[in-house]
Structures are given as C-alpha cells and as structure tokens.
Amino acid sequence: MRELVRPAARIDVPVEGKIIGIRRLTAREKVFRIELPGGARLAHQPGQFVMVGLYGSGEAPISITSPPSPGESFELCVRAAGALTHRLHSMEEGDVVGIRGPFGRGFPVREMEGYDMLFVAGGLGLAPLRSLIRYVLERRDRFGSVTILYGARTPADRLFLDELAQWEGDRSIDFRQSIDVGEGDWTGRVGVITTLFRGMELKPARTMVAVCGPPVMYRFVLIELLARGFLESRIYLSFERRMCCGLGKCGRCQINGEFVCRSGPVYSYLHAGRLREAL
Amino acid sequence: MKKLEVDVHHLTRVEGHGNIKIRVADGVIEELKLEIVESPRFFESMLVGRYVDEVPHITSRICGICAVGHTTAACRAAEKALGFDPPPEVGALRRLLLDAEFIQSHILHGCFLALPDFFGVPSVLALAETMPDVVKTALRLKRLGNTICETLVGRHVHPVSMAVGGFTRWPSRDDFLHVKTMIEEAADDLEETVRLFEAIETPSFDSPAERIALRSEGERYELLEGVVTSSAGDSVAEDRFDRIIRETTLPHSTARHAHTERGSFAVGALSRYAVNHDRLLPEAALAAERLGLSPDTTNPFHNNEAQVVEAVQCAGEAVRLCDELAAARPPGRFKAVARRAGRGTAAVEVPRGTLYHGYELDGAGRIVGANCVIPTGQNQANIERDLHRLVGVLLERGEGDDAVRLGCEMLVRAYDPCISCSTHFLEVEFVD
Amino acid sequence: MREWVLSGDDLEGLIDSISAEWDLYAPQRKGRLFEFRRLRDFEDLCIEYPLTMIPPSSLFAPGSEVLYHFDPDRPAEIESVDPARPIALFGVHPCDLAGIAILDELHLSPPIDRCYANRRSGSFLVAVECAAPCVEESLCADKETYRARRTFDLLLIPSSGDRWFLRSGSEAGDDVARSCRFLRPATYEDRCRGDEESAARNARFKARFGLDAPTLSARVEASWDDLLWSAQSRLCLSCGACNAVCPTCHCYAVDDVLPVKRGESGERRRRRTGCQLADFAVVAGVENFRGEKAFRLRHRIFKKEVYLVERLGRSGCVGCGRCGHFCPAGIRLVEIFRQISGEEKVDA
Amino acid sequence: MAGILKPKIGVFSFTGCEGCQLQVLNLENELLDLLERVEIVNFREALTGGTNDYAVALVEGSISTASDERELKEIRRNARLLIAIGACAHTTGLNGMRNGESAKLAWSRVYPDRAFDANVAEEVRPLCEVVDVDFTVPGCPIDRDELLRVLTVILAGGTPRPSTTPVCDECRRAGNECLLDDGRICFGALAPSGCRAVCTSYGESCAACRGHLPGAPVSELMALLEEKGIDREEIILRLGRFGSRERAVAALLEELFPGGRNAQEAAS
Ligand SMILES: Cc1cc2nc3c(=O)[nH]c(=O)nc-3n(C[C@H](O)[C@H](O)[C@H](O)COP(=O)(O)OP(=O)(O)OC[C@H]3O[C@@H](n4cnc5c(N)ncnc54)[C@H](O)[C@@H]3O)c2cc1C
Ligand code: SF4
Ligand code: SF4
Ligand code: SF4
C-alpha cells in the first residue's frame, strides 16, 4: 500500500462562482446568475445540480435551472430554507460563492427526442424542470407536443411568472396551472396538481414524462399517470435527499443501494419504483 | 459639603448585582447601605428531596466564579454526612484545584475588575489598548488557572469529575506533570504581576477589623479544611462555626449579615493572610514584603495585594502538590459512597473567604435540610461599616459626589464581593 | 510470500525497526477498554487484546478531520492538509484488516477521497491472528474474517513456545523483515508445525449460521416488511454507538470552522456520522426520510448485507461484533440474523 | 450582520450563576483577536458604564422576577440580534427545579423572617418564553469553542446551525465507555452534542444541560434504565434537574409530584 493514485480532477473543492445577476421571484425564492472563473462553461445536462457553498454555512445541492447553453453563465433558483440559503439571499451582485459540479445524472434528453413531452412540476420542482423545459423549447422541432402542468401553493408562490405567461400564450404548448389555496383575484384553477389531468387528452404510448415536486406529490401524480397507461420506463422523477459531498462518499443521499448524487437525482420510475425507500 | 447622594445602581465589575445607596444631609450620613438585589434562586428548596450524589453538581451552580469552592465544600460536607473519609490523594487533588481557582479568581479580580480603577479607565478592555502587555500577562495567568482545571476535572466553571467520594476520573501522571510545567512556566508572569501591584499606590484608609479564616495543624497555608480561627483569638471546629458566627437578615438585602459577638468581621485573602501569614512559602512571603503587607494591617484596600500574594502562594503550593500527586498511587476506580442518613458540615476557603456547606440526609441519602454560608454575606456588615468610616473620612476632606462614589465603589470592589453567591443562602434547619 | 520465526523476546525489536520509519500505533489499555494509541513504552503494548472499542481503521478515517483550509472570503481551497507522517498499525485483528480493505475500496475508488488517501498511502499494517473469537457477539467465523488473507504488510501468527511466525504480505513487509537481523527464515519443519497449529486454532472459530454472503443477503432482502425491525429497535436510543464503533461505517457530515482572528484561515472539516442518528436523512429541517428507528436499523443492516454486497461483491459487515457488544440497548446482529435465517446452527 | 464592520455587543445577565459570562472572559486566548472585530459596550461583570446602543445582545440567566422581564424586553428592543447563552437562558437550566412549587412557600423557607418580595415571579422562565431569541448557545456552562463558532458565523453574516446529533455520538467517538453499561443514569442520548462530551469524558454522566433534541428518546431511555433496575423516581428527579421545561419531562414530573412539588405541604 505504498503509492496510491492521486486524483486528477478536483471536484472535491469549490471554484469561485461570481454572482452576476439576481432576480427575486417570490418572497422565498431568488434566481442567481453565476459565472465561473475565466468564463469557464459548466457543461451540464438538464436535471443536474451543483454544490453551492459559503464558508461558515456549508454547502447545499442546488439544481441548475437554466438550460445547457454555449454561454458562460448559468442560473440557480434558490429558496431561502435554512442557514446557507438565507445567507445566499442576502448576497449581492459581484459577491462570490463556492461552486462544485455539475453532479449526478440529469434527464435522458437524447432518448426523449421524438416523443411528446409532459412536464409535471410542483412548487420549487419547477426549478430543475425549467432547465429541461427550456432545452426542449429551444429544440422544439425535435419533440412532439409539449404539455406543462404546474401546481403551487398560492398564486404568490408561483415561480418564473414571465415565463409562465409566455408558455400560456404559446399555442404550441399546452400549459395548465393550479394552486392549492385560492387567494385575492386568482381566477384560475384551485386544487391539487392532479386535478389538472382531468379532461386532458394525452397519448401515453408516445409520451415522456418528467416530474419534480415535493415527495407527497409523487405518490398522487404516479397513481394518475399509471392509471392512464404511461410506461414506467418513460416517467422520470427527480429526487431530493440530504447530500454532503456530491461524490458518492458521504452516504447521506442513499435511497436503498443508490447514491442519489451519482446515479440520480433523476431516475426513471421503472428503476425508482423498485427502490423501496424512494417513494 | 451639606448634602450628598450617591446611588450606584448595578455596581459594575463585581460578580452579581448590587447597589450602593448613600444619603448625607448636613454632613451627617442618614442612610448608607450596600443592597444585594440578585433574584433569589431558592437553592435550599430545590435541594430538598434530591439524592446526595447530585448535590455538588447543583450547588456548583450557585456561583460560576467559585465553582470549585462550592463543589469542594459540597463534597466534603456530604462525605461527612455519609461518614466517609476520602483517601489523602483526594484531599491533595482538591487542594490543587482550589489553588487553580484562587489563581484564576484573584487574577480576574485584581487585573480585570480592580485594576481599571487605579488607571482611571472603565474596564480592562480599555487597558488592552493602553497597556497591552499587562493585559496579556493577566490573560495568560487566568488561562493557567482555567487550564489546570480543564486538564484535571474537565473545566473550571462547574468542574465535572469532582464527586462525593472522590473523582470520577483520576488524572494521569502525565496530566499532573503537564500542569506542573505550565505553572512553572508562569513564573515570569507572576513576577510581572507582583511588580505591577508594587507600583500601584494603595489608597490609605484605616479601619481595623476582626479577621476570620481556616487554620490547620501542620505547616500548610490552609484552604481545604481546618479550624475556624479568628484574629480575636477564638477558634472553633468547622462544623461548629455557628457557635461564633451568627446571622441575621436585613430588609435591604437578599443576603444575610453575619456577626461575631464583637460585631462585624472580615473573611477573604487579607484575613487568611492575617491568620496564616507564618505559613506562606518563601516566595509568597517575599511578595508580601515587597507589596508592603503586614499581618496586622488595618487597611481593607490591602485585600488586592493579599490576593496577589496568594496567587504566588497557590502557584508554589500547586507545584508541590503536582509532584506529590504524580508520585502517588492513583486511587482505584471511582465508586459512589453508599447512601445513608447523616448530617455534616464542612468549611472550605474560597477566593473570597470561608465557605460553609452543611447537609442533613435521610436514610435513602436524600437531602432533608441544607445550609450554605457564603463569604460575601459574612463580609457585608463589615463592608457597610467600612463604607461608613470611609464616607466620614471623605466628607471631612470635603470631597464631592464623584470622589465619594468612586471611593465607595473601589472599597466595595476591594472586598471582591461575589453577589451571585451571596443571595443563594441556604437554610440551616438542623433539628437537634 | 516469505515467512520467518520471531521469538517472543524480539517483538520489541520488530516494533523498534518499524517505529524507525513509521509512527506506530498499537493496542493498549484505556480503563476497562482497549484502544489503538501511539506506542511510547513497549510495556504498554497489549498484543493479546480482545477487541478495541474504536476500530483501528479510525486512524485512516477519523471521527473528525480537516478536509482543507480556506480563506473565509474566497470560495476556493487555499491549502490542503499536509501529508501526515505515515503511520503503522501494529496488532490489527483479521476482522479489522477486512474492515480496512472495505474502507480502502470505498474511499479510493474514483473520485478518490484525498484525505483518506493521504493517511492511508504509505501506511504499514501489522496484523495478528486471533486465538479465539473475542466476544460473544463475534461473527468472524460466519464472515470468514478470522484469518488474514491480504491487505497486511506483515502478519504475526502466534505459535507455541513463546514464538511467532511472521509472514510478509508486501514489498514493504519484506523490507522491514529483511532489516531485522534477529528473524530466522522459517524452515520446512517450522511450516509444518505452523500449519498444525493453525488448523487447531481455526477449529475454534465455528460459524453460527452457515449462510454464505449471497444467501444471507437474499434472506435480509426478503425481511424488508418484517416486524422484526420495529421489535428489535424498540429500545434503540439512536445514539449512534453502533456506527461509531463499526470498522466499515464511513458516512459523514461537513462543518466549517471560521477563524476568530482577521486574516487567518478557516477549516472545512469532515465529521463522521451514522445512519442510526435521527437527523441522518433529514432535509431542510423538515422531511425525514428515515424518521422511524425501525427504518434506520433496517437501513444499517441492509447497507451492510445487501447494498454493499451488490457493490463490492462481499458483505460490508466484517463480523467483529462491536455494534452488538457496545450497544447500550443490547441490539445484536446475532439476534437479527438468527431471526432472519430462522435458525442458529451453533449455540452461541 | 453582513456589512457591519465592528458590531457593538452587550453582555447581560439575569438569574443564574454568571458562569456563562465568565466563559466569555475565559476566552483568554481569543479575547484580544475578538475585540479587533467587535466592540463590547455593555458588560457589567467586566466594565463600568453602559449604553443602549448595541447590535448584538448576549444574554445569560433565566427570567425569575418582574424586573428581569422588563429589562429583557428593553434589551430585545435595542438589539438586532439576541443570543441566549447558557442553560439558564435557554431552558431555565436548574433554576427550573423550583417551578412546580409556590414561590411564596419557597420564599418562606429561605427567608423565614422577611416578607415575600412581590417582584419574584411565580415561575422561572427561559428567555424564549418572554421575547424572541435569535440563536442559542446551550450548555451549563456554555462551551467556549461553541460560543466562538456561533460568533464567527454571525460575524460572517451567517446563521449558526444548532447541533442535531446526540452527545452519545461525540462521547463514543471520544473512546469512552458507556456509563449505561455500568448501570448509571446518563442522558447523552437526549442532549445535542457540541460540548465535546466533557462530562462523560471525565467519568460523570451527562445531565442533558444542553436541552433535549427534538424527538429525544426519553421513553426508550426510561424503559432501558428501568429494565436495568434503576428506580423510576430517581431517573425522573435527575431528568428534572435541567429538563423541567421539556414537555416529556414535565409530564414525568407531574406523575411524580401530582399538582406540584409541594402540593401536600401547601394543602396542610
Ligand atoms: C438534488 C437536489 C437539488 C436541489 N435543488 C434545489 C434548488 O434548485 N433550489 C433550492 O432552493 N433547493 C434545492 N434543493 C434543496 C436544497 O438543497 C436545500 O433546501 C438546502 O440544502 C437547504 O440548506 P440550508 O443550509 O439553507 O438549510 P439548513 O436547514 O440549514 O440545512 C442544514 C444542512 O442540511 C443539509 N440539507 C438540508 N436540506 C437538504 C436537502 N434538501 N438536500 C440536501 N441537503 C440538505 C445541507 O447540507 C445543509 O448544510 C435541492 C436538493 C437536492 C438534493
Ligand atoms: S448502538 Fe444500539 S441504541 Fe445506539 S443507535 Fe445503535 S442500535 Fe441504537
Ligand atoms: S447556565 Fe449554568 S453556567 Fe450559565 S449562568 Fe446558568 S447556572 Fe451559570
Ligand atoms: S455532557 Fe451533558 S451535562 Fe455535560 S456539558 Fe455536555 S450536555 Fe451538558
């Protein structure tokens, strides 16, 4: 045991990510545009995440909400949930954060080509899905129909309002949204996200589904999808677990034998359905 | 000077909350009191019904500054009640810990709380800018006292392993030798401190007092046990202290006033020095000489100097104890003392004077009665008497409000009162 | 592979020659327990010890360590920890050796864990064969970890008449042995005697369940919905002792320590933690993916007997018996396996 | 706190032993470096003079009188961040041992010759029951390193994270024997780590002075200790030393002293 191989790449220590733009979406969520040193490209897939860190507050896994692009920066949509994320919210343009990644496996975008796309996003789950949605919309011709279902708690909790409006106005997209609790002048639909399925014409045999939202949502959405005959292998879900490394070492994110940070966070239901701890 | 009013609300740089109130009209002191206003904590009430093993951990929380002292007194009193005589190494380690607490407390008082007065600044934090070396020296010495306790019993504030019957963890030989080295390395810092106090001019003030401290047979400058001895000649066994010390409560204080039959008396560093000066180690005796102390001093301000002398004394004693303990065979694995009924009172010297704890236990080893007599309470009557005299002197000199206020504050501080402790009086209700 | 004969008196000589190059850690008493500590005095060595509470592998994967130093105002690492002076572990039991082998695979598979590699590379392992199972909870016979097969640099095999066989398992082991003048190469007769003694010793290690890893794994897998998990975890205090003493537990959390003094660097630290602690799988302070003791206990056993078997091809439990021996609530693998396998072959 | 270069700090004290303030002064090795980054403007134990102009208040002690309550509210108005330090401030510490007993009765035992002081509250309360507390540094006394960890994070503009793992974890990793195996009462499984398990490392059982973790396994521990033959009453008394404000413990205390500690005495 004398000489051991030294690691070549250094994904275990962060690089400097400079905040070049901040946008507030709701009372709890902000979008940060981040640039890597020397304008390096992150080169990520939709559904992947980075570890964002601030010394003194540790690190947190955050999905990349922008689509892969040749450009030099990327976006993170962050909810102020705890110590680190609150501190992120107090940061300003020009401040720097630590970035490691991208990590994990995202959505199988190549395999999805040629299919109709159904997106089911609940709450903050829109953040990772937005990356895929925009990827698909940028390559609209390679995909069949596009349906986006979005559920939020209240109207004020909805993210990316400008984009929601755009999708709503886009005739080539079937966009539907619903909120759990009606509020103020909300005239749209009220009810849990599964109510959006009612009366929809979907073609399960030609559709790929991407789902992201809070754990409870998965159970209900899956019942709905399976009842309509969607194939287990074409339903993709993104999972959230505790993560301290992103390297498959810390053991925190395990769902049964899987390390979510390496083989996830996106899994097909064909696979995840067999993981007894997943849902 | 016809009319004067001093009202120091929340006396600072003392442990605990206290007020000084003085009202003078037509040159006559109409009102003078040292109020102790700490919220009462009802320790005696809380102790009743608890098992004896818990007592040191509970009474330690009477005061974080003399935690080792309270814990030691509690352990010794409980052991007496249980009829248990700990082996001599246990006594030696307790002495060593008291030495450490004395060093830490005396340095805290002398350099952090009292010194700023002599340089006319509000706190040691201000001194840190003007006299950084003095402050660094003091910090190192204070650290020394803390580190000794940390190494030997886990921490200073609420020591962990001091228990009824001995120590739940006996330090290793290396621990003792490590502590010894640390103390030896502090010699220069102690010398610096003596020099610092040599250069300070003590206010001159004359107020003779009866002085009481523990004194034992043998040659030790006693801290742990012994006979309660008065400079007036009385002496009495520790568990009979109430034969010479009587207490009364006063309406303006949550503490009690103590008297001998001759009136108020003083305890603390200066009293121990007065009673035990012949027992000082040579280096401490030399320090006393350099600081101009004499056993029959009548100036209460000399308590500051006596504390410095004791810091030197305790360091020297601690080194000897380290050697002794490193060479001694460690006692076996700790075993709790068997519970039984009994009654015991013990006295221990703590930085501010003699501390008495007494407990009565039922057959299951639970507390049925507890009593605790604290140094600051014993000093309070004497402090008020000294304040009277001091205000008289200052008025005669024609000093104004500010000078009187500062003089009074300095005098109270010289006694190093620990007001936290003193409100936590426990009741003596021993049914004979 | 070469073998030598070492007389009991020369053990100290062997230790001295290893200590010349490595910081040597060996089993010593700590109160009523044993632990691997820097050996300062040969007298303190307890080579015939039953089991240390903290496994020797903790010297490579300590409970708490600095991952790297940083400037609090800049996100990048400024300085990684200095390569440690290489350490030697003297007197490692075969089960713990197997534990180290598993930690090696987990940490040194890409992406390589720098800190572990730093401590592990250049280390030197002297194993010692056991005369009998150490504790009632030992499962080394079932796990076939009672004999050292690989991973060691030198292996001490007790032999009758106050002597040892010394076997080398690496070049470094050869080098050390060759530098020891007092070693006598083993003769054919020595080997024959050694084999006889080994056979006698091995007979003292009897498997309790007689289940091979795949069979046990399948049985465990089938127990997912069993009531046994809630019954067994009834008194679990979620204290994490079982994780802390396990030679193959490796999960961790990351904490930062910021400097007090302006301009000084801070530390990013790793703190080993365990799946039995209630907070292990909590996200954002609310959702707990293993909120019940039963789920946590099940996960621990599944991790060792199912997930690691899938990943490494062998059980993640090396059968040292620590988790049961040191569990204050008396939760024992032996009992769990007994229930899962439906029978126990040999009386405990 | 981001943006504040040298925040002003006040140190305040209510009912307690002042050991936690002393722990601040006991930061001998770091005090001068700390003073480069903060200004201590209020610290009665160490400094004369005081001001209402401070951004951060470190508050020690429980609230046991009407005047304590008034002063604490005033501090809350002045401070941007209020940090509770020590068990007294966090959970009432052992001051809470007097709860469940009438204050008048307790008073009459301690000061038989003096009239009851109406300032004394019937119940001792932790700070959080009187005002909003931003962070807590638990323990009796506080651990100096933990205090530094909290202060440095705050100075960096962050939010300190409370520990969520038990003292047992620290204790085992420190290589200690478990006191439960010896038939001793130990509460390490209940309390959050962060004290370096100093008590158990020095052979003394953990008293859970740092409070209880959410969902602390009180009933499991009780069952285990009782199975070992330890008297239920003794366990409850011990739990009550620091834990009287924990709901699970309060229920057990009520079981032990129905109607309060001196219900019988009061009735007679
Ligand atoms: C793959 C993945 C993608 C995510 N994407 C996003 C996103 O795009 N936007 C967003 O706002 N949030 C996202 N989250 C959740 C986000 O990581 C948590 O909200 C965040 O870690 C909370 O950290 P905190 O320090 O602010 O909270 P605290 O409650 O103070 O967290 C304490 C510690 O717990 C850990 N932790 C807490 N919650 C989580 C969690 N859910 N996952 C992992 N570790 C956790 C962190 O390591 C943190 O250090 C994602 C989580 C995962 C696993
Ligand atoms: S050691 Fe025992 S009680 Fe502690 S977490 Fe493990 S199984 Fe539970
Ligand atoms: S928590 Fe403990 S140390 Fe702190 S003030 Fe209260 S009694 Fe004293
Ligand atoms: S071990 Fe327990 S009692 Fe001791 S300091 Fe830690 S939490 Fe408090």
Image: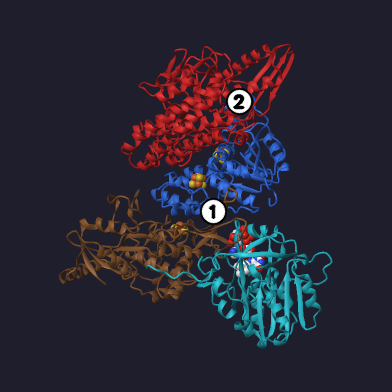
Chain colours: A cyan, B red, C brown, D blue
- The crowd level at tag 1 (other Cα within 10 Å; few <14, some 14-19, many 20+) is many
The chain identifier of the residue carrying mark 2 reads B
Q: Which quarter of the picture shows residue D67? A: top right
Amino acid carrying mark 1 in the image: Ala
Determine if residue B21 is in view: no
Determine if residue C176 is in view: yes
Question: Residue D125 — which label?
Answer: none
Q: In which quadrant of the rendered image does the C terminus of chain B lie?
A: top left
- The crowd level at tag 2 (other Cα within 10 Å; few <14, some 14-19, many 20+) is few
* Circle 2 residue: B118
The spot of residue D244 in percent (x, y) is 57, 43
Secondary structure, mark 1, is loop
Q: Total marks drawn?
A: 2
Amino acid carrying mark 2 in the image: Phe
User: How far apart are the two marked residues, 1 and 2, measured between alpha carbons?
Assistant: 52 Å
The spot of residue A129 in percent (x, y) is 68, 74
Q: Foreground residue, D256 or C73?
A: C73
